[in-house]
Amino acid sequence: MEEKILHARKNGLSMLLLFLVMLFGAVGLIVYSGYSISVNRMLGYLGIVVAAVLLITAIILMCGLKIVKPEEAYVLTLFGDYIGTLKEEGYYWLNPFCSAVNPAANTQLSQSGDIAKTVQIVDGKPVPASGETVQSKAISLKLMTLNNARQKINDCLGNPVEIGIAVIWRVTDTAKAVFNVDNYKEYLSLQCDSALRNVVRIYPYDVAEGVDTTGDGNADDGSLRGSSDIVAERIKQEIQAKVQDAGLTIEEARITYLAYAPEIAAVMLQRQQASAIVAARKLIVEGAVGMVDMALQELSQKELVQLDDERKAAMVSNLLVVLCGNHDAQPVVNSGSLY
């Protein structure tokens, strides 16, 4: 289905004035015919019939008045045939038998857009709550934000992860959006879920050894937590490939929530704490060894004291205990000989 842009004349205001003249003329003719019945019954009845036809015609023709706001569009059909899309803002008069089509007008998702805030289900049909109006059949061409619900997905290592995304999108081809899919908003939400699962299963939550996330056969350090921009870009491309036929364009996709699932969150936290402790200890030991080496070199160069191997070993042991301990050292004064 190819989109056809209508370039209609913005003659809505002039046609509205014409219809008002017809309405007032019909009312005046009815009043005049009522007074004329007593004089000429046939002429009076004829005037009433003409006024009724004029009144009904004006009401029917007024149904063709359309207001198109900026960044909105009407997909118009005439007796089931697609005749075009009206996109340019203005006040128009169209064929009153044309009908606007928007199957997603009353679809309520967790997103911004042209939908009623609350919808009640009455007899299986969505109806806005009291105080709210039914959304028109206009299709919004503005940027829309879809906050997809959090999903529990297993990463490439099998760990359950909870993740949520926000997708910024817009309708670029109204004909495809209306006629190629049943409901383009629900279709987009479903494709976002599918694309998110496909991409998350490629990455580990955190950097892991021997994992190839790029598909080139070589292990890399890609992860959901550390490569969020790359992951978001892949999610965007995955969604765009799926919604291309629906006339939608994905402008951006961003990860809004990322965490381990509650059932393994405590265990993974202990694992992260253990890794942090090991890394910190490794750094402390490296620094302590460097300080001990520096101390021995300074003593040897300045010839402050001559130490044999046994005394050096004792000194190294004492310094490492002091530098690597978790608590402040409590010195013990040795007043005697080492031997």
Image (cartoon, grey):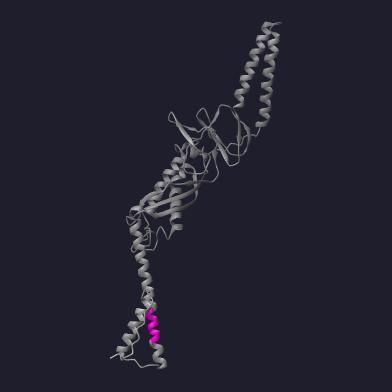
Image location (x, y in percent) of residue 261: 36, 53
Task: Return the residue nearer the eye: 130 or 19.
Answer: 130
Image location (x, y in percent) of residue 313: 31, 86
> What residue span does the magenta drawing correspond to?
288-295
Residue 105 colored magenta?
no
Q: In this view, does 58 lie above or below 9?
A: above
The residue positioned 36% from the left and 63% from the top of the image is: 272
Left or right, 184 with reference to 261: right
Residue 217 can be seen in this image: no
Q: Is residue 78 above or below residue 107?
A: above
Left or right, 44 with reference to 204: right
Q: Is residue 146 above or below residue 126?
A: below
Image location (x, y in percent) of residue 330: 36, 80
Left or right, 60 with reference to 287: right
Q: Quadrant of the C terminus?
A: bottom left
Choose top left, top right, bottom left or bottom right for residue 276. bottom left
Choose top left, top right, bottom left or bottom right for residue 305. bottom left
The residue positioned 39% from the left and 88% from the top of the image is: 297
Image location (x, y in percent) of residue 232: 45, 54
Query: How many numbered dots are placed on residues in this image?
Result: 0
Residue 293 colored magenta?
yes
Magenta span: helix, strand or loop, mainly? helix
The residue positioned 47% from the left and 49% from the top of the image is: 166
The residue positioned 70% from the left and 13% from the top of the image is: 32
Task: Return the residue nearer the eye: 242 or 301.
Answer: 301
Residue 307 can be seen in this image: yes
Task: Return the residue nearer the eye: 261 or 126.
Answer: 261
Question: Residue most toward the left?
Answer: 339
